[in-house]
Amino acid sequence: MLTSLAPLVVALTVLATAVMAASAAIQAVRQGFDPFGAVVLAVVTAVGGGTLRDILIGRFPVFWIEDLTYIAT
């Protein structure tokens, strides 16, 4: 049962990463950031929360180093 849920979990995680990046980019545009600043803010926001979570629970390497799909998103 759990193995059949793995693709769904990955898909939802990638979707959540994309939504966080989009919300950060929208906020960056509202604040008048240049395109480079908006991209940096979007990437930091998208992977920052999961990175902090992994560090606090002692999971190394962090999720986006094992699977670069999250950075490509």
Image (cartoon, rainbow, N blue to C red):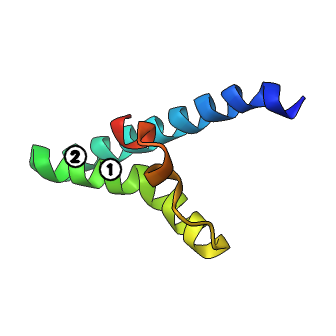
Rounded to the nearest angstrom, the CA distance separating label 2 from label 1 is: 6 Å
Q: Residues within 10 Å of mark 1 (few under 14, many from 20)?
A: many
Image position of 65 (left or right of 60):
left
Q: Secondary structure at mark 1?
A: helix
Residue lying furthest right: 1
Specify whether 21 is left or right of 9.
left
Where does the image place residue 51, in percent across and percent down from the top left?
Answer: 50, 62
Question: Residue 72: x percent and y percent?
Answer: 34, 36
Q: Position of residue 67 (x, y in %)?
A: 48, 43
Q: What is the three-letter code of the residue carrying label 1?
A: Val
Residue at 28% x, 43% y: name it: 25
The residue at the point 66 percent across, 71 percent down is 57
- Above-or-below relation of 49 to 9: below
Above or below, 52 relative to 5? below
**Would residue 32 be seen by someone viewing this image from the given angle?**
no
Is disc 2 placed on a helix, strand or loop? Answer: helix
User: What residue occupies the far left of the structure in this picture?
Assistant: 34
Place of residue 50 in the rendered image (x, y in percent of width and height, measured from the top left): 54, 57
Q: Which mark is residue 39?
A: 2
| Residue 50 seen anywhere in this rendered image of the structure | yes
Give the residue at mark 1: 43
- Tell whether 26 sits left or right of 61: left
Residue at figure coordinates x 39%, y 54% from the top left: 45
Image quarter of the C terminus: top left
